[in-house]
Amino acid sequence: IITGEYTPGMRLIANDLAEELSVSRMPVREALTRLASTGLVELIPHKGAIVNELTAEDYVEIFHIRSVLEGLATRLACPNLTDDDLRKMREANGQIRTMIDEDDVQFQQVNRIFHSTIWQRTNSKRLSALLSNLYSEAAQYRHIMVIMPGRLKEICEEHEQVLNALDRRDAEKAEQFVREHYENTLQWLT
């Protein structure tokens, strides 16, 4: 779903997926239930799962929520981030800089490393899970962001602001920069 192999509106049939993945139907059903809990699919009784198609309004809602929750996560994580965490985030941001003409699946993975490093240091399983779900739910939209001229460069610069504030252990500024990062994304979206 995240890579676009299964497109919005596509019906996902457990038997077919089990055969395709060479597994039994039980893990496929469990996976579909988990995907439904994240909003990526809708389970329809007697029909199976359908890949959700999010509207522009859905993405705006997701990014408003992420702005607040990512800001909170950054503030909570700031004192817990190690030098190794910050190095890993800088490496991820450096990789993103080289991806202007690359495929967006790789961007999704590297960008997730940047953000999930923060989520993991919040010491809040619920907040991490919420942000992970919202990140996955917005994956279809993130593809558009990568191909918009100039946005990838801005993302790197915004990440750099966050990193600089985290380096200084300035939780307030880091939270502010993360929220601005999502507000800037919203401006590109609308």
Image (cartoon, rainbow, N blue to C red):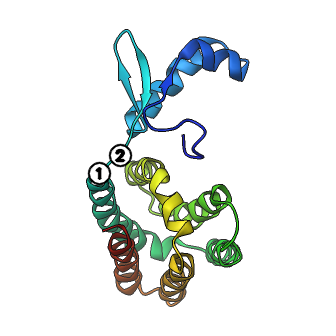
Identify residue type, mark 2: Leu
Where residue 26 appears, as percent x and y from the top left, is 57, 13
Q: Residues within 10 Å of mark 1 (few under 14, many from 20)?
A: few
Above or below, comparing residue 135 to residue 82 in the picture? above
Question: What residue do we see at 40% from left, 77% from top?
Answer: 181
Q: Is residue 84 left or right of residue 68?
A: right
The amino acid type of the residue labelled 1 equals: Asp
Circle 1 residue: 58
Task: Give residue 81's mark.
Answer: none
Q: Residue at x 36, y 67 (%)?
A: 189
In the rendered image, which residue does mark 2 sit on?
Answer: 54
Image side of residue 157 versus residue 109, left or right: left
State the residue in front, 81 or 132. Answer: 132
The quarter of the rendered structure image containing the N terminus is top right
State which quadrant residue 127 falls in: bottom left
Element type at marker 1? helix
**Quarter location, residue 109:** bottom right
Q: Residues within 10 Å of mark 2 (few under 14, many from 20)?
A: some
- Mark 1 and mark 2 in contact? Answer it, CB < 8 Å: yes
Q: Whole-Å distance between the Cαs marked 1 and 2?
A: 6 Å
Expressed as whole percent of the image width and height from the top left, the position of residue 91 reads 70, 75
